[in-house]
Amino acid sequence: QVQLVESGGGLVQAGVSLRLSCAASGRTVSSYTMGWFRQAPGKEREFVAAIVVSAGRTYYADSVKGRFTISRDISKNTVYLQMNSLNAEDTAVYYCAARRTVIGIFDPAGPYPYWGRGTLVTVSS
C-alpha cells in the first residue's frame, strides 16, 4: 500500500506560479510511476502529468505542456508539480496518484490504484 498526501494548493492570481507536493509513505516510490490529475468544478477528472520515478521520464497533457513541470525527489519520497503561468482554467482540485511501474505498453494516464485526497488550486483572473 502507498499512502499519498498532496499539499501546496491555494488561492493565487493569474500569471503566478505554484508548486504542489505529493508525499508518499508506505512504500518507496522509486519503483512507481506517479501521476498528477485534476478535476475542475463540473468537469471530469483529467490527466495532467506523470513521471516514471526510476528513469525520470515525464509525460504531460497538451494543455499544460511548457507551463507545468513534474519532478521527483527519491530521497524524500516526494513528487512535485511546478505550475507556471497559471490561468483561470487551471482552477481545480489536484490529485496525486501512483502505480507500480510495469515494463510494456505504457499509458501515463492510467489506471492508478493509489490516490491522494487532493489539494485545491484556485486561480483568480
Image: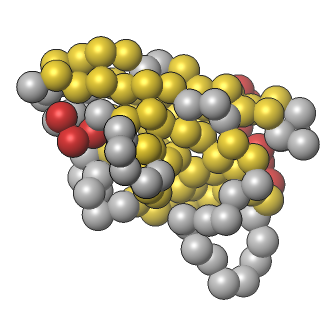
- Point out the image quarter for the N terminus: top right
Along the line of sight, which residue is nearer the eye, 46 or 96?
46
Q: Residue 15: image x %, image y %?
A: 13, 28
Q: Position of residue 89 (x, y in %)?
A: 21, 42
Total marks in image = 0
Identify the residue at image location x=37%, y=50%: 43
Residue 83 placement (x, y as % from top left): 32, 35
Q: Is residue 61 left or right of residue 115?
A: left
Closest to the observer, 92 or 24: 92
Q: Identify the residue at horizontal 75%, vertical 47% (top origin).
A: 114
Q: Nearer the viewer, residue 38 or 44?
A: 44
In this image, 94 relative to 125: left or right? right
Inspect this view and state whether residue 32 appears.
no
Q: Is residue 83 left or right of residue 46?
A: left
* Residue 55 figure quarter: bottom right
Q: Quadrant of the C terminus?
A: top left
Which residue reaches farthest bottom? 105
Q: Residue furthest front?
A: 42
Residue at x 26%, y 57% (from the top left corner): 63
Depth check: give the residue in front, 51 or 118: 118
The residue positioned 47% from the left and 52% from the top of the image is: 45
Indicate left or right for 76 with 82 as reference: right
Farthest residue, direction left: 125
Image height check: is 111 above or below 89? Answer: below
Q: Residue 56, percent across and down?
A: 58, 55
